[in-house]
Amino acid sequence: MAALSDIPLTFTVRRCKPEFVAPAKPTPCEQKLLSDIDDQAILRFQARVVHFYRHQPSMEGKHPAEVIRTALAQALVLYYPFAGRLREGANGKLIVDCNGEGVLFIKADADVRLEQFGDTLQPPFPCFDQLLFDVPGSEGLLNCPLLLIQVTRLKCGGFIFAVRFNHVMSDGPGLKQFLSTVAAMARGEATHLIPPVWERHLLDAPNPPRVTFTHHEYDEVEAAVTTTTTSLSSDNLVERSFFFGPAEFSLLRRLLPPHLRHCTKFELLTAFLWRCRSLAINLDPEEEVRMLCAVNARYKIESLLPQGYYGNAFVIPAAITTVKKLRQNPLGYAVELVKQAKASLTEEYVKSVAALMVIRGKRLLFPNVIGSFIISDITKMGLEDVDFGWGKAVFAGTAKAEGVISYFVQAKNKKGEVGTSVAICLPAPAMERFAEEMDNMLKQQPIEDKKSKSIRISSAM
């Protein structure tokens, strides 16, 4: 996909002073324990999601920030833990102090039109720090607001809704459930809401805790000496977004043997990106690399979790191999590894992860080394369905990659084709090699079809 613009988009945002939005009515003052799955080390960060909305003539004269702020206060009556603060209990156990202090909210206006963001919307977005201002002192895990929301009205009458949320509180489906409640309140249609369910104990470890699986996703990895950066803390990082539409997926499938061509899009694209990334980062050929798949466990443990549960309900089973094996084997090898990692997810696996959190506790740190890569697919989450009264979002998804974490988001190309966009974050030299590896793979002759024309994956800076 072509760059969003040859000239960087610049605009001015006029922000009101950040304010706290508390529940519209008194709520219980109590402490609630998070689950042992919520307490996974990989979730201890702030995630960012953004929605773009077009002008809606029927909402003329209404500032979206004012409509959403009122609805937010109403929704927090039901979801009052979001208005609290995280504390740390015995053995590092995370607790929500439900004190009603509120969430941070910013009303803003920008002198830019929606169409100026380009024909296609995909992360990373220009000037995103203006669309979601990180209020100083608000980003901590403990004793800080659990939500930061900025609603920016655009010159055309559309608006951008951006939210930063503490990931230990909810996963993507949980956040979508909460935002859908806010949206229903904003539309005045809050009569058939799914009641929120806390019940975090359902995903606690058994007593006594028993680890029954090998969890390579939480191996204590020591980064080997390499010819490139071993972590993603470098100042020389770049982020690029790559789009995969029907033509690209078709070609990728033809690089697989017939028995693997019915794999899912997630398995196919994850394997492809993992292989290209692992070859691009210049690790020692014998070094192990890990692909961690964020897999939603809700459908595997439906009998365990009631409808309305909005906590984290996913784990990250790992595929593991060496750089050398990824290089020497065809794409189907990586696909098989990803399929095996996904297949390991069972209710017992989830309980084993919870037990690992309890047993290893604070000693369990996720290694942010460049040889680890995490993919989370949010294309089917339905974030674009969140309607505050201005209709469905024209784009809804994560705003950026988060270090070693990349997200699959639904997007459209200039032809209007719906596909998958994925943002990748790497040191600049590795990013160039990554793009080259993708092109080299796609120049390979498809299996059993020597005449097929290769397709070049394009990117947006």
Image: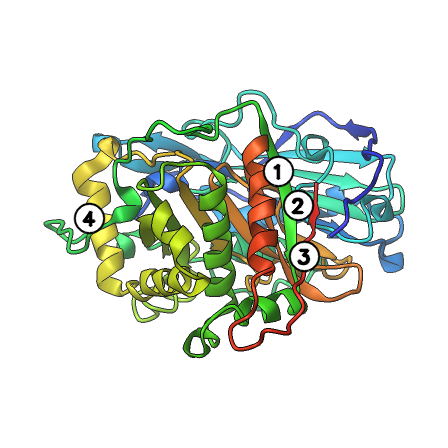
Nearest to N terminus: mark 4 or mark 2? 2
Tag count? 4
Expressed as whole percent of the image width and height from the top left, the position of residue 255 reads 52, 68
- Above or below — where is 136 with respect to 286? above
Q: Are marks 3 and 4 in contact (CB under 8 Å)?
A: no
Residue at 86 percent of width and 38 percent of height: 112
Classify mark 4: helix, strand or loop: helix
Residue 90 is situated, as x and y percent measured from the top left of the image, at 21, 31
User: Which dot marks residue 364?
Assistant: none
For mark 1, what is the residue? 239
In this rendered view, identify the residue nearer to me: 256 or 375.
256
Mark 1–mark 2 Cα distance, whole angstroms, equals 9 Å
What's the CA distance linking mark 3 and mark 4? Answer: 45 Å
Q: What label sits on residue 123 in the rendered view?
A: 2
Q: Amino acid at mark 4?
A: Ala
For residue 285, side relative to residue 390 (left or right): left
